[in-house]
Amino acid sequence: MQASPQFAGEGFVNTYSSSAPRVVDDKPSLTDFIFRGEGRTPSKPLPSQDPRAQWTRPVETGLRTTWLGHSTVLLEIDGVRVLTDPVWGERASPFSFMGPKRFQPVPVDIAALPPLDAVLISHDHYDHLDYPSIRELAKLRVPFITSLGVGVHLEAWGVPAERIIELDWWESTTLPRGLTLTAAPSHHFSGRSLHDRNATLWSSFVLRGERHAVFFSGDTGLSPHFAEIGQRLGPFDLVMIEVGAFHPSWGSVHLGPDNAITAWRQLGSGRFLPVHWGTFNLAMHPWAEPAEVLLAKVTEGLVMPRLGEAIEPARFDTVQPWWRDVASGHWQGSALEAAEFLVLPAKD
């Protein structure tokens, strides 16, 4: 790991400059996190579908996606199935009794997934690398593809070392059925406690099959890496970009919907499937704000299926604002939960 160009001194660093520096004087306070809860959670479960019947049908265009919540997507590309950032756990937290709780269960259990060819994990934060999910998925005989250093968690949780593939930025691996996965830059950070900050790498990924290519952002802020990825690894048929859990004071570590639109345009191609929203209360903004901003500002190419809806992006024509059927509720958290919000995005 220490031979990586992204490793410096005691940990990994962002080697691209940020295009969106954080606004320090707008940092939310502990009081804000505890009491300013209006709109941050839905008042009832989101509309969802059971995708199992759809999964039994052929993928006519060669590319099908099922958004299962947050950044968890079942991607079916040119006959290969890849599961991204699988999180079935109830909380995105080191604790089972507190921390951001998911709005509702995943539409299907892990046991109900169709046969997988690989599991892809972008980085080690709790809302992307989930202990109970990995323990269950470790029972499958599939490779786990991830960023440098993340394999230490996977191996400790039951994934055999020979099934773990760690990649540095611009490195690739090809699955037996012909899909090539390439790790690419992102602008973020890593760590699962206050003592392992940036000990592992964070990445975006490009998946390229015989006929289709997909970009998956992982977590990232805006930087020149998007244009470079588009030039070096594009064109894309679909881009899956994080749009939620943002705040001006968090600077370069998350995009938010406006910067996600800019990133999509810098990538230069592909339909836009927003991820990293509608699942956990991880920021101060109303839970549906990313969806409303995107609907207002993206006139073509936006793909926003319901939770669990298996769709072929090439045949997805019109976005229906299904989230408007769910009113926003009020969230009030504990001081401990608020402190966790404040600590995790503190360093970019």
Image (spheres, rainbow, N blue to C red):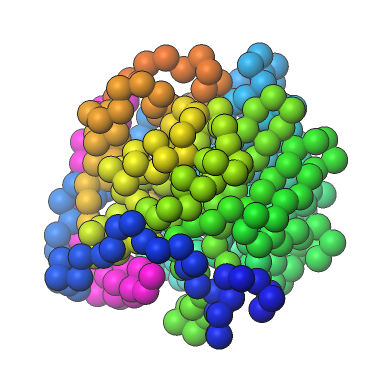
In the image, what residue occupies the spot 47% across and 68% down? Answer: 14
Residue 330 lies in the magenta stretch: yes
| Horizontal relation, residue 337 to residue 162: left or right | left
Looking at this view, is 27 or 341 the one in front?
Answer: 27
Locate the C terminus and report the quarter of the image it occupies: bottom left
Q: Up-down: is 276 above or below 293?
A: below
| Horizontal relation, residue 238 to residue 260: left or right | right
Looking at this view, is 83 or 9 the one in front?
Answer: 9
- Which quadrant of the structure image shows residue 178? top right
| Horizontal relation, residue 242 to residue 82: left or right | left
In the image, what residue occupies the spot 67% across and 49% down? Answer: 182
In the image, what residue occupies the spot 54% across and 46% down? Answer: 229
Across and down, in percent, residue 145 comes to 70, 54
Q: Up-down: is 301 above or below 189?
A: above
Looking at this view, is 154 or 49 the one in front?
Answer: 154
Read off the magenta span: 322-348
Q: Up-down: is 136 above or below 23?
A: above
